[in-house]
Amino acid sequence: MFISPVISPPARIILICSGKGGVGKTTLTANLGIALAKLGERTTVLDADFGLRNLDLLLGLENRIIYTAQEVLSGTCRLEQALVKHKQQPNLCLLPAGNPRMLEWLTPEDMQKIVNLVAAQADYVLIDCPAGVEQGFKNAALAAREAIVITTPEISAVRDADRVIGLLNTMNVQPVQLVLNRVRPKMVANQEMLAVDAVTDILALPLLGLVVEDEQVIVSTNRGEPLTLTESSSAAGRAYHNIARRLRGEDVPLIDPSKEKKGIRARLMSKFRLAGLF
Amino acid sequence: MALLDFIQRLLGLQKPSATTAKERLQLVLAHDRSDLNPELLEQMRREILEVVQKYVEIDLEGGDVSLATEDRVTALVANLPIRRAKAMPVGAPKDIVLADSSSKNLAKPAVCEDSVSSEDVGEDSPTPLGEVPEDVPPAESATDLPHASQASGPSEHEAETLP
């Protein structure tokens, strides 16, 4: 049988969504994009949040945008002209979101068309999904094959994530994996924050990654340099790198930081619990 | 965690907030996932109670029919304290009811739990089960059990309506 050496496996098209806003979709998309690019994968991140686009800003590419998905769709430019290549990580490209008015006319077919174009020359396509469960989410989800749901250990975020998971299940998006963001190990150890296994039990999804609360995330967004870009070993940066490796099928053990080191109060509490006081 | 909270937790006066969060989430998700509108749920609840009341006298205020969820499976959980058995018509139903309640009593005394679906998520019942006495009279000798319904949990609803 003839096998052409130029045919590469189809791109993995991954939706990054959360339901609730502000839980870390765009930060995950930017960091994961860079991390995958570093691992040698041709990665395109696609900003599907046409209403409130921010992915360009987190990647530090906001000044280099000339064309957007809108011009690609209307045929004003070719895809190659719209894609913004990252200077330090040329494996990473951004397809910027168009004008917010795109929301009014964009159909699932349009979205599908953009994604197919992008996927033809990439190993990974990451779609940064808008918050909410309305048409913007549905357009993005219908164009994706698999999904990463990101949530924080807060009841509102978990509830919204659950809603999104329910919708993804009806849209045939498979597999759906979970990233738990902004975990505060101390609070979890003191039972003042939902524990990791409580969230995974409730949502019944495999855990792809665990990102602890890290001030460096804010510093990195200030600069427009995702944490995964630099070698500095921030806790969140390491977590994003691990997520990228797990996504590629590497077996990277997950460590629950709340079980690693306990605060003095938590230790005291567990001693009391052992003594049968609770 | 403030020191006062810490002391209250040590003394067992306050549940950890993470536990409260988990319980609240499980309840709200059970409703979200079921997509049953509250009106239909209420109607179903009434009809279930009517059927059960044909056979046993139940403590309506202490009881509860609610949705619970585990592993993305939603279950309907009925938690109905029995006051006394009614005079049974001849035949099988009595035996079935008794056998069922006595087997469940091993784990959760004084509470007859009818799980409509196969999933049985009893922990979410609003009445604390741990405070119920171990020795529960079987339903046929339960001529009148005010203490049993009291013991099945000091929930707010109950406190108001008990004689």
Image (cartoon, rainbow, N blue to C red):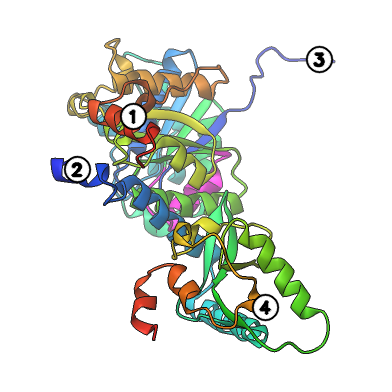
Determine the chain carrying the residue at label 1: A
Looking at the picture, how far across and down is residue A115, in whole percent?
Answer: 51, 38
Label 2 crowd (10 A; few <14 / some 14-19 / many >=20):
few
- Is label 4 on the same chain as label 2? yes
Residue B125, compared with residue B9, is above or below; it is: below
Q: Amino acid at mark 2?
A: Ile
Label 1 crowd (10 A; few <14 / some 14-19 / many >=20):
few
The answer to whether residue B159 is left or right of residue A147 is left
Which of the two discs, 1 and 3, labels the residue nearer the N terminus? Answer: 3
Label 3 crowd (10 A; few <14 / some 14-19 / many >=20):
few
Q: Amino acid at mark 3?
A: Phe
Q: Secondary structure at mark 4?
A: helix
Q: Is residue A137 magenta?
A: yes
Q: Which residues are magenta?
A: A129-146
Residue beneath disc 4: B140
Q: Secondary structure at mark 3?
A: loop
Q: Quadrant of the C terminus of chain B?
A: bottom left
Q: Which mark is residue B104?
A: none
Looking at the picture, how far across and down is residue B57, in whole percent?
Answer: 59, 84
The answer to whether the residue labelled 4 contacts the one labelled 2, judged by CB atoms less than 8 Å apart, is: no
The answer to whether the residue labelled 2 contacts the one labelled 3, judged by CB atoms less than 8 Å apart, is: no
In front: B23, or A233? B23
Disc 2 vs disc 3: which is toward the camera? Answer: 2
Q: Which mark is residue A2?
A: 3
Label 4 crowd (10 A; few <14 / some 14-19 / many >=20):
few
Q: CA distance from mark 3 to mark 4?
A: 80 Å
Determine the chain carrying the residue at label 4: B
Disc 1 vs disc 4: which is toward the camera? Answer: 4
Residue beneath disc 2: B7
Residue beneath disc 1: A271
Q: Quadrant of the N terminus of chain B?
A: top left
Q: CA distance from mark 2 to mark 1?
A: 15 Å
